[in-house]
Image (cartoon, helix red, strand yellow):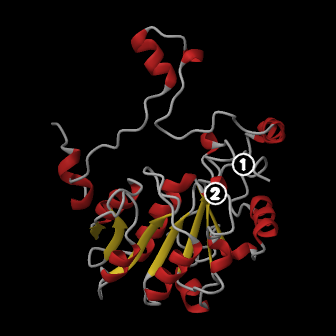
Amino acid sequence: MAVDYQSLAVTGVQALSPYQPGKPIDELARELGLNPADIVKLASNENPLGPSDVALKAAQKALSELCLYPDGNGFDLKQALANRFGVNMDQITLGNGSNDVLEVITRCFADRDAEVIFSQYAFAVYPLVTQAIGAKGVSVPARDWGHDLDAMAEAVTDRTRLIFVANPNNPTGTVHGAAAIEAFLEKIPANVLVVLDEAYCEYLQGDEYPDGVKLLAQFPNLIVCRTFSKAWGLAALRVAIALARQPSPTFSTVCASPLTSTPWRWRPQLPCWQMNAIWNVPVR
């Protein structure tokens, strides 16, 4: 007797279409009979310079302890990040790449009765995770291929729980200055969380662009996401973080798990075995 797994899946997952990632270089080389060294892959925005020698040496050193489970709290990495950003360690959430962090945030703060706002041409993960949990995705038409922040603020309703803003935007490359981002945040109610996805912020040059981490003190409903996959050339390690203001004791008490690595205890009551011992070292 065959099992129809599709019919057993939750409604949101049933309606999903498989995500099509960028084709691996080796696969393309096999299909076309090309030399992999002659192929430059652009689809995934990978750093062609690769990781630093310091990161490579640290990763090599960590390989000798692959038989051991990693520190589920990610102490070394979080300590280094706290020093770099000038925040407390318990303001930092670690995840396996941006996809993981963004999904955890969505699953924690949105449900089937919620609305999640994102821009028309923003990162594909925003609508995917929204649909997967059964929430209503509100795609706001783009303006000049980027976020129409005024329209996104106007789209907020009593059901809105999350707003995703990618700055710079992926995949269109548009960017908003600090003044525009702050003006947008001022319009959003305190009970609506704004996720500022700054995966490409290291490529920006100039004081006119925002630093989301510095905005945390001013906007308590702001969550800032960063990744080590792009500028730092560590895409294969799958390392991303989210930074937020300190939570209320009530929320931590209700949702806490003794083995989580998250400041807001976003993850469900499960051990955080998804932590990677290798990326707990070289990212420092």
Mark 2 residue crowding within 10 angstroms, few (<14) / some (14–19) / many (20+):
few
Q: Is residue 237 above or below residue 165?
A: above
Find residue 51 and report its horizontal and vertical position in percent.
73, 38
Q: Is residue 5 above or below residue 244?
A: above
Residue depicted at 37% across the width and 75% down the height? 110
Q: Which residue is mark 2?
A: 204
What kind of residue is marked 1? Ala
Find residue 90 and report its horizontal and vertical position in percent.
70, 75
Q: Are marks 1 and 2 in contact (CB under 8 Å)?
A: no
Residue depicted at 45% across the width and 8% down the height? 33
Q: Quadrant of the N terminus?
A: top left
What kind of residue is marked 2? Leu
Q: Residue 217 lies in what quarter of the image?
A: bottom right
Q: Which residue is mark 1?
A: 277
Q: Which mark is residue 222?
A: none
Q: Residue 40 lies in what quarter of the image?
A: top right
Q: Quick one: label 1 or label 2, which is nearer the N terminus? A: 2
Q: Is residue 78 above or below residue 7?
A: below
Give the side of residue 92 with respect to residue 41, left or right: right
* SS at circle 2: loop
Give the side of residue 16 with respect to residue 254, left or right: left
Residue depicted at 48% across the width and 54% down the height? 99
Q: Is residue 272 visible?
A: no
Q: What's the CA distance linking mark 1 and mark 2?
A: 30 Å
Given residues 61 and 206, the one toward you in this image is: 206
Find residue 86 and report its horizontal and vertical position in percent.
78, 74
Given residues 280 and 64, the one toward you in this image is: 280
Residue depicted at 69% across the width and 68% down the height? 207
* SS at circle 1: loop
